[in-house]
């Protein structure tokens, strides 16, 4: 799945279309990371939950499940719910493209799913190294942000968890071991194109009146 710098790069581009500023901007960008926090992306998180719960991964697409449960908040453009939805949509969009492309061009013959997943994550982490985003939160922001985030049924975070998220973003060291390597499946140009396609698709699906498809 896309890494945090990719999620924040996508979120930073989308937030301009949403015209969120101030607190709304901070809430939206933080929520672009929120599904991963209880999922164990950070080791020190107080409460860890299964990926299926944090990513609403049951029955059908994660983004559709989340939308069905939180449609009113999303229609009202609540930045927390909209950011959470955008994370799930981003994961699904990139994941779908990777496996669809492998199948279409018969590139995965003789390679098991774990090996394919390693190739996918390698390229996402390499793409991640093109960006460096921080949330620039102040200590006094954290209690209110945690309270807002915990309104989402799958979230259960503390102000300390948020501070740890900011620390990870500032250090920006999670992909140090693959910096300078070459893409194994994608190219940077192709991932740039997918980023723009994904944002346009989300905009059409969720920001232009009623949702027509997802």
Image (spheres, rainbow, N blue to C red):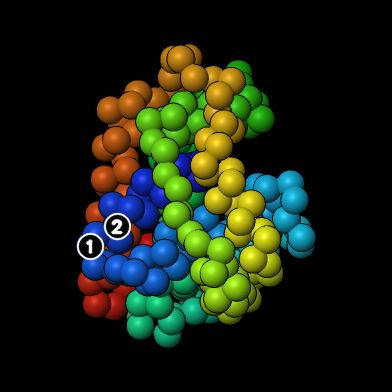
Front-most of residues 101 and 184: 184
Mark-to-mark CA distance, 2 and 1: 5 Å
Give how far across and how far down residue 73 sits, in percent.
43, 81
Residue 14 is tagged as: 2
Give neighbour class at mark 2: few <14, some 14-19, many 20+ (Cα, 10 Å).
many
Front-most of residues 157 and 91: 157
Front-most of residues 153 and 13: 13
Horizontal side, residue 52 vs residue 176: left or right: right
* Quadrant in the rendering for residue 130: top left
**Residue pushed farthest top?**
181
Location of residue 78 with respect to 103 vertically, above or below: below
Does the rendering let one see residue 35? yes
* Quadrant in the rendering for residue 47: bottom right
Identify the element where label 1 is drawn: helix
Quadrant (top left, top right, bottom left, bottom right) of the C terminus: bottom left
Does the rendering let one see residue 7? no
Identify the element where label 2 is drawn: helix
Give how far across and how far down residue 83 sits, in percent.
43, 64
Q: Residue at x 60, y 64 (%)?
A: 56
Give how far across and how far down residue 154 sits, in percent.
64, 70
Q: Residue at x 35, y 49 (%)?
A: 10
Give neighbour class at mark 1: few <14, some 14-19, many 20+ (Cα, 10 Å).
few
Contact, CB < 8 Å: mark 2 with mark 1?
yes
Front-most of residues 83 and 183: 83
Q: Which residue is mark 1?
A: 17
């Amino acid at each position: 799945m896309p890494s945090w710098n990719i999620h924040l790069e996508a979120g930073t581009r989308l937030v301009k279309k949403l015209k969120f500023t101030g607190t709304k901007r901070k809430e939206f960008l933080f929520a672009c990371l929120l599904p991963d926090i209880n999922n164990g992306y950070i080791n020190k998180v107080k409460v860890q939950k299964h990926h299926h719960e944090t990513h609403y991964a049951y029955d059908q697409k994660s983004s559709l499940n989340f939308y069905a449960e939180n449609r009113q908040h999303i229609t009202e453009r609540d930045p927390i719910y909209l950011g959470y939805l955008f994370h799930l949509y981003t994961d699904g969009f990139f994941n779908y493209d990777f496996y669809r492309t492998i199948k279409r061009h018969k590139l995965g013959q003789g390679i098991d799913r774990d090996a394919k997943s390693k190739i996918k994550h390698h390229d996402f982490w390499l793409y991640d190294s093109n960006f460096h985003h921080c949330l620039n939160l102040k200590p006094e922001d954290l209690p209110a942000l945690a309270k807002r985030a915990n309104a989402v049924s799958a979230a259960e975070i503390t102000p300390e968890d948020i501070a740890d998220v900011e620390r990870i973003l500032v250090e920006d060291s999670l992909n140090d071991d693959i910096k300078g390597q070459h893409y194994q499946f994608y190219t940077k140009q192709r991932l740039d194109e997918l980023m723009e396609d994904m944002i346009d698709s989300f905009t059409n699906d969720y920001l232009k009146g009623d949702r027509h498809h997802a």
